[in-house]
Amino acid sequence: MVKVKEIFTSIQGEGPLVGYKQLFIRFCGCNLKCAYCDTDFDAKNAQEYTTEELINVCNNNGDCHSVSLTGGEPLMHTDVIKALGNNCKLPLYLETNGTLAENLTEVLDYITYISADIKLPSCTNMPPMWEKHEDFFAAAGDKYLFAKVVFDNNINDFEIHKITHLCKKFDIELILQPMMSGKFPVVNSEFMQEILDKCIKIHPKTRLIPQVHKFIDVI
Ligand code: SF4
């Protein structure tokens, strides 16, 4: 049995696969405490599922592009991910904070897409995790992987240097995602453009993609 906070279908609202219909499985628990986190992944009021039940839900939603494993931190549930990978007809799309390299290694064969965060100390209020992210990207091998960076007005040049060189090293897309307050970014458009331009100079595979689902009022 595994505690799952919610299961629903919606569109992917972030990153390069934005707009695809997905089945979302939100797992409980996370190994981080980001200051901006607005996700309820508390095990309180969560529902318990057997892996067979989860597999059935996945296979009953065949019109979806993929199954988004989200949280919380889905990599805290590697046994469930393996079971889903072995039995689901849909590809698995992992939405992770990009810090649990060993757990990723366990499930890598079962995952098709990896959306991994790079956490900026300036907006998470967490200690730097550059080495953890680097280990994580190395563990992803040649999987379809991109890095997502939530930023606000406090992003600084040192962080820009770190995120661009990290993504350049692994030759992956860097997706800049302005932090949102309701339907709107907390940074203005000039600042977004400035940060995008600074990143592109170092790593041309940088894109700016806001959370689309928030301003079209989809979950
Ligand atoms: S890693 Fe994600 S789910 Fe966990 S605290 Fe940070 S924003 Fe929230």
Image: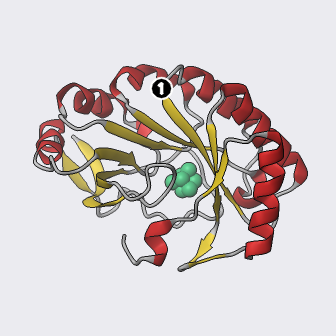
Q: Nearer the viewer, residue 209 or 154?
A: 209
Q: Identify the residue shown where x is 39% and y is 57%.
A: 12
Instruction: Indicate which quadrant contains ligand 1.
Output: bottom right
Vertical position of residue 206 compared to residue 110: above or below: below
Q: Nearer the viewer, residue 135 or 47?
A: 135
Quarter assignment of residue 156: bottom right
- The image shows residue 50 at horizontal and vertical percentages of 16, 40
- Image quadrant in which the C terminus is located: bottom left
Q: Ligand 1: does it lie within 8 Å of the C-beta at label 1?
A: no
- Image quadrant in which the N terminus is located: top left
Look at mark 1 in the image and give the residue it sits on.
143
Image mark count: 1
Crowding at label 1, few (<14), some or many (≥20) Cα neighbours within 10 Å? some
Vertical position of residue 219 compared to residue 62: above or below: below
Vertical position of residue 28 compared to residue 171: above or below: below
Q: Identify the residue shown where x is 54% and y is 19%.
A: 141
Q: Identify the residue shown where x is 79% and y is 59%.
A: 195
Quarter assignment of residue 169: top right
- The image shows residue 66 at horizontal and vertical percentages of 29, 44
- The image shows residue 23 at horizontal and vertical percentages of 26, 52
Report helix, strand or loop for mark 1: loop
- Given the current orientation, which residue lies at the most extreme right position? 157
* Amino acid type at mark 1: Lys
Q: Identify the residue shown where x is 37% and y is 20%.
A: 109
- The image shows residue 96 at horizontal and vertical percentages of 50, 43
Quarter assignment of residue 164: top right
**Color scheme of the displayed model:** secondary structure
